[in-house]
Image (cartoon, rainbow, N blue to C red):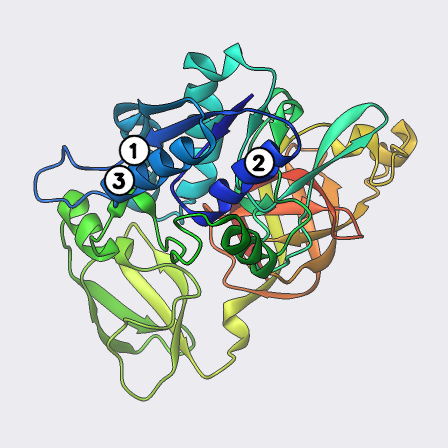
Amino acid sequence: MALLASGGVDSSVAAHLLIEAGFRPDLYYIRIGMEDEEGYIDCPAEEDMEMVTLLARKYGLRYEMIDLHKDYWERVVNYTIESVRKGLTPNPDMMCNKFIKFGVFEERIGHLYDYIATGHYASTEIIGGKTFLATAPDAVKDQTDFLAQINFQQISKLLFPLGHLNKQQVREVALEAGLANAQRKDSQGICFLGKINYNDFIERYLGKKPGRIIEYETGKVLGTHQGFWFHTIGQRKGLGLSGGPWFVVKKDCKRNIILVSRGYDPLTQYGREIYIDKFNFITEDLFDYGAVGNPLSQEELDAGLPISITLKIRHTPEFVRGLIYKRKEGGYRIESAEPIQGIAPGQYAVIYDTDEHICFGSGMIVRGER
């Protein structure tokens, strides 16, 4: 068994729990920082590796550092830059799990092991002999939305030792076990940036291009921005406008225009319909499997009948109820039971069963409508 150790308290407690259960996992630290890029400060990799080294010594485990910096740059950082260049809202954490932690690592090392364990807050359920991704009891820390682009082969060999715990319980286990990082703060933000400001990173690769900020309802020019790529739909802060609050409700990338609405809760920042071209179903195609194991008949599919789901479009503890339709012309349409704030192309809609437990997968949003 291999365990992906980050140096944080979560993966360390995962190792401790595995050892208590009678396993002896090999520890692997994946290094992905930007130390090779001039002018950039790496994630705290040295401190992370020190924590993993102490963990390995404490339990007498084998430990190895795997440098996937080049792969991470090619598959995740470039994806982030290109998404922003196109006016999309990227999800680097999701791509890191899909392509790096359970992709490149699997190709190089993971295939040698029957199981790979991580410190993610998630769980699995065996239904009909197949493994499904499922949520953790800590709704705030649950990370299934970041795992929703993995495939069946990947989920079939993943173990989540923290799947039954909340964050407070993890801290308590770490303190009782005397782990060196028991009180260490959780990492924040996008790891590859280290201590670098996100806008500084974007400016380095995309530069600046002044454009107009226009009021959506009236067409009035309110001010200027430095490039549409610095802004995302639903954004409130950082617009530099007085008399607000103002929200970004639309972007015209061809004309480099940001459209905004004023108010604490303007209707223009909400939508009820989400359109997706391609969907990644982790274990079963929902329309073949059915939300509760009862697939729709061909007649029902031909009639365009939907399946009831719950969903998220960003990392949040709250779920939204809705319906998902398979479109005859291709792709999918999600109809939300309530308005959703800030639907942005490039985000991923993650769908779950109506019990908010089984995660079926995710698809990139191509557009949202009111």
Q: Secondary structure at mark 3?
A: helix
Pick whichever of labels 1 and 2 is earlier in the sequence.
1
Query: In the rendered structure, which amino acid carries the disc numbered 1?
Result: Ile
The residue drawn where x is 34% and y is 34% is: 53
Looking at the image, residue 233 lies above or below residue 37: below
Residue 254 in the image: state x and y as whole percent: 29, 50
Identify the residue under disc 2.
277
Q: Secondary structure at mark 2?
A: strand
Left or right: residue 366 versus residue 105 is: right
Neighbour tally class for label 2: few under 14, some 14-19, many 20 plus, Cα within 10 Å: some
Query: In the rendered structure, which amino acid carries the disc numbered 2?
Result: Asp
Q: Secondary structure at mark 1?
A: loop
Identify the residue under disc 1.
32
- Name the disc covering residue 45, or none: 3
The residue drawn where x is 66% and y is 33% is: 21
Query: In the rendered structure, which amino acid carries the disc numbered 3?
Result: Ala
